[in-house]
Amino acid sequence: MFFKSKKLLGLDIGSTSIKIAELDLSRGRATLQSFIMAPMPQMALGTGEIVDLTSVGSILQKVFREIKSKRTSVSVGMWGTSVLVKRISVPRVEKKLIMEQLKFEAEQHIPFDINNVTLGYHPLPFTSSADTMDLLLIASQNEVMRQYMQVVESAGQKCQIIDVSGFALANIFELNYGKIPNEVVAVFNIGAQITNFVAIQNGEIIFCRDVPVGSATYNSELSKNFGLTYQEAESLKLSSAKGQEVPEGVSQTIAQVNDQIIEEIRNSIDFLSVTNQGLKLSKAWFTGGGSLAPGLLDKMSQSFEIRTEILNPFRRVSIGRKMNMSYLQQVAPFVSISMGLGLRQVSDS
Ligand SMILES: Nc1ncnc2c1ncn2[C@@H]1O[C@H](COP(=O)(O)OP(=O)(O)OP(=O)(O)O)[C@@H](O)[C@H]1O
Ligand SMILES: [Mg+2]
């Protein structure tokens, strides 16, 4: 008798590239078997929603062929404006009635039409009063979920799980660093359009937000200040990150964008603190292509006065025999979300 494989591919559709990770899990140990990254055409994606379904579908078809996996289903991450995660307090009810209660409460908490979203929740480990429950309300836009399913199906795979990208980030963090006791830590994945920010207390997610800031801002500012195309600005940014010589003024523009990004992230950290009784972060881990921008992380650790570290997504992950180690070192800043998604199993909901 044959059983269909229950293993999934982790799929992270980002605005500059698509990433796919294939992991095996056995006795609590994860092994990364494959990872593929493919560039996305500019403007194919908005801040989460898919603008050009045909292009994204054909890129997916190519990467699924290239990864040569026997798996036929994916776990995909939603991010940006297509999903909202918000802490709310609702009257305490039995677990089986929580969804009903949420439908009733959600309207006042979310800016979208309630009929156009799918609701979910993530329980929080604390509560503000005995009569209420605190939880993270998750509202995903149906239209964007349909787009994700459509492109994945057009490439011959099934969308088995649609997760929140920030939760996948917390998953890969916990796998590599475990539960950090008695501290509140943060993980930031700085992308091109968005920075996924998740805060974790004693191993539990307590906050998750996509900050609308990322590495594309360097490109737009460099384009504006030096009359360059987006691609030219990208090359200039990468040259500067490699320490190569760049025209006068480029470093100043990059430093100004560093300050803008830091300011946006600071606002979100302040929001976390204000909505959680003045809670303080003790440490932050960073990943994502945007974290490679020249001077950004150094400035960040000075400005926030918290310990910072670069996230090592392979810290407690075995590496499959097919993988090339120097390629893995190169792609380490880009793999986290797809790996976190790849840890999900069909039996998960
Ligand atoms: N070596 C580098 N130095 C500086 N920036 C880099 C480097 N490599 C990549 N980047 C930048 O990182 C960004 C891509 O990172 P990433 O793949 O994490 O984003 P994404 O997932 O496509 O974006 P988003 O999730 O916001 O849609 C690009 O803006 C790119 O310019
Ligand atoms: Mg991304």
Image (tube, rainbow, N blue to C red):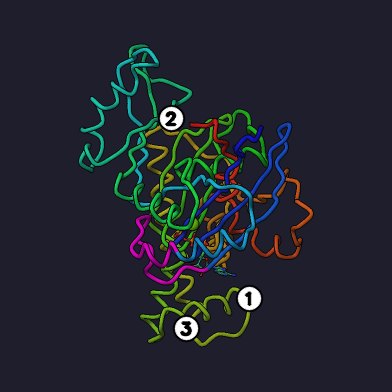
Q: Residue furthest front?
A: 1
Q: Residue 254's spot in the image, x, y percent?
A: 48, 73
Q: Which residue sits at x=55%, y=67%?
A: 293
Helix, strand or loop at label 1? It is loop
Q: Which mark is residue 242?
A: 1
Mark 2 near mark 3, Cβ–Cβ under 8 Å? no
Instruction: Verify whether residue 54 appears in magenta.
Output: yes
Number of other residues with Cα within 10 Å of mark 1, as a class: few under 14, some 14 to 19, many 20 or more? few
For badge 2, the amino acid type reads His
Q: Which residue sits at x=50%, y=64%?
A: 17
According to the image, label 2 marks what residue? 122
Quarter placement of the N terminus: top right
Apparent side of residue 111 relative to residue 223 in the rendered image (left or right) = left
Q: CA distance from mark 2 to mark 3?
A: 43 Å
Helix, strand or loop at label 2? It is strand
* In this view, 278 is above or below 61: above
Foreground residue, 148 or 181? Answer: 148
Instruction: Specify whether tag 1 is near ligand 1 (CB below 8 Å).
Output: yes
Which label sits in the foreground, 3 or 1? 3
**Which is the main secondary structure of the residues drawn in magenta?**
loop
Q: CA distance from mark 1 to mark 2?
A: 41 Å
According to the image, label 3 marks what residue? 232
State which quadrant residue 136 falls in: top left
For badge 1, the amino acid type reads Lys
Q: Which residue sits at x=60%, y=55%?
A: 335
Q: Which residues are magenta?
A: 39-57
